[in-house]
Each structure stands twice: as structure tokens, then as C-alpha cells.
Amino acid sequence: MSTYLKIQAYVKARYGFEPKTCWIADAKEKCGIPVREAWNRQPGRRKHPCPENKLPAIKDAFEHFGLLKRR
């Protein structure tokens, strides 16, 4: 099972930036991967959504760890 730390390490090694955990959670929702509701999340919106230019790198990490099927 992949953790947020493993996803962050993979993206940093491959793409040169470390995604915020809130970006990963937002990307998971956009890809239809189930996420738990954070205790401090405001209903219906994210304070820091994943930037569109970072989404492909995070999706690649999801594919690498088997959360999404490879294209």
C-alpha cells in the first residue's frame, strides 16, 4: 500500500518537487480514488486544491503505486 510519504518521495525524485498532502488528497478525489474526510476539512471545498500543472506528476505516482491503471 502506498502512503502519502511514498508518493511525495516518488514525485520529488522523478519530477523535482514535493507535493503537499492536500494536493495528493485532491488529486485522489479527482481520479475517483476514495479518501477519508479530514477532521479539520471545511465542508464542500478544499483550502489548497491541487494545481493543474502538478496533477500529471501525481497521477503518474498513482499509476506507479497501482492506485490507477496505466494508460
Image (cartoon, grey):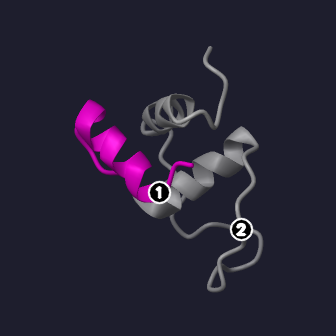
Q: Nearer the viewer, residue 67 or 30?
A: 67
Q: Which mark is residue 53?
A: none
Q: Which residue in the protein does label 2 denote?
A: 36
Check the image and report above or below for 56 versus 42. Answer: above
Q: Residue at x 51, y 63 (%)?
A: 22
Residue 53: percent from the left, percent from the top?
A: 43, 35
Task: From the image, give the main secondary structure of the stretch colored magenta.
Answer: helix
* Mark 1 neighbour class, 10 Å CA radius: few under 14, some 14 to 19, many 20 or more: some
Q: Please report the bounds of the magenta region as a residue range.
A: 1-19
> Looking at the picture, how far across and down is residue 16, in whole percent?
22, 38
| Quadrant in which the C terminus is drawn | top right
- What is the residue that sits farthest to the top in this orientation? 71
Residue 5 colored in magenta in the image? yes
Identify whether 59 is placed above or below 1: above
Q: Name the residue under label 1.
A: 4
Q: Describe the element under mark 2 as helix, strand or loop.
A: loop
Q: Is mark 1 on a helix, strand or loop?
A: helix
Q: Which quarter of the figure has residue 32?
A: top right
Would you say 41 lies left or right of 53 here? Answer: right
Q: Which residue is drawn at 43% across and 33% down?
A: 57
Q: What residue type is labelled 2?
A: Arg
**Mark closer to the chain start, 2 or 1:** 1
71 shown above or below 66? above
